Amino acid sequence: MKVEFSKYQGTGNDFVLIDNRNNIIDANNFTLIKKLCDRRFGVGGDGLMLLDNASGFDFRMRYYNSDGKEGSMCGNGGRCIVAFAYHLGLISETAKFIAVDGEHEAKIIKTENGVQVSLKMIDVLDVELGDDFYFLNTGSPHFVRFISKHDNFDTFTEGKKIRYNNRFAEEGTNVNFVSFQDQDITVSTYERGVEDETYSCGTGVVASAISASFKTGRNQFKIKTKGGHLEVHFRKTNDTQIENIWLVGPATHVFTGTITT
Ligand SMILES: N[C@@H](CCC[C@H](N)C(=O)O)C(=O)O
């Protein structure tokens, strides 16, 4: 079978995208999805998204981690699938789509290098404030720990320890490490389902910015990741309720091709 795909990246978090409005891919064929994400035997990516039809919406986003399993919400993936829908001619300046965590809206701005996508994330209704960590769900579960600096910090080793500790081993969690540079933050992330450090994680950056607001009282952050810069802003109604959360950054088409499966 020949499968047409496009490869996108959002601050280095990279994805295989397939227009599945004609059901060319069986959404439960996890072996095929894992193979397409494989960097040696497939296209390669941190994850894969199927763009499906959804009544009442511009499209449905179905997200899989590179292990082939259906994941929870992916923020960078959400921004990339909006850019994909824009390039397919399915949407123009705005989008309304449905994903595993519910409804999302997005705004697209054309830039010199491609497009910038602002993605509205689900409200955060509960934040666990631990002794030296924050734990919250921004569409995906995120553990957040602040560190003094990122120089030589081993995100993979430290992240993996937390992801596989007694509390998280079964369900898994994504793990973020955050350091401050004046008003801004740097975030590195170990991703569940990729089981590695990725260059950026959208839902992780959102969780990190919300956690940083407990330390600074601010509701807007510029964030540096290994793969580029993102921005997050939100409204905090009380200490654990955060709404109107927006993740903003570039979403870039890398290449389009056909793979024989
Ligand atoms: N890369 C993602 C996060 C994807 C979700 C995740 N790995 C999971 O299923 O836990 C992002 O940009 O948010």
Image (spheres, grey):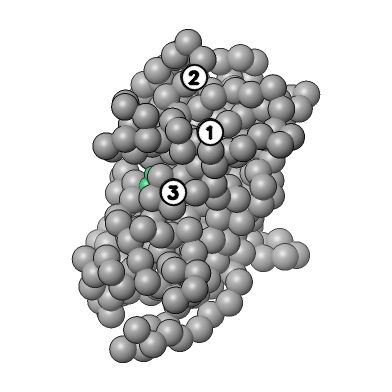
Where residue 177 sits in the image (x, y, percent)? 58, 31
Label 3 close to label 1 by CB (< 8 Å): no
Asked which secondary structure carries label 3, the reply is loop
What residue would you read off at disc 2? 133
Q: CA distance from mark 3 to mark 1?
A: 12 Å
Q: Nearer the viewer, residue 106 or 221?
A: 221
Q: Residues within 10 Å of mark 3 (few under 14, many from 20)?
A: some
Question: At x 36% / y 21%, what residue is drawn?
Answer: 126
Q: Is residue 130 visible?
A: yes
Q: CA distance from mark 2 to mark 3?
A: 20 Å
Question: At x 32% / y 26%, what residue is drawn?
Answer: 167
Q: Nearer the viewer, residue 144 or 251?
A: 144
Q: Residues within 10 Å of mark 1 (few under 14, many from 20)?
A: some
Q: CA distance from mark 1 to mark 2?
A: 13 Å
Q: Residues within 10 Å of mark 2 (few under 14, many from 20)?
A: some
Which image quadrant is residue 24 in? Answer: bottom left
What residue would you read off at disc 3? 195
Q: Which kind of residue does numbered mark 3 sit on?
A: Glu
Q: Is residue 106 visible?
A: no
Q: Which mark is residue 158?
A: 1
Q: Quadrant of the N terminus?
A: bottom left
Question: At x 64% / y 24%, what residue is drawn?
Answer: 147
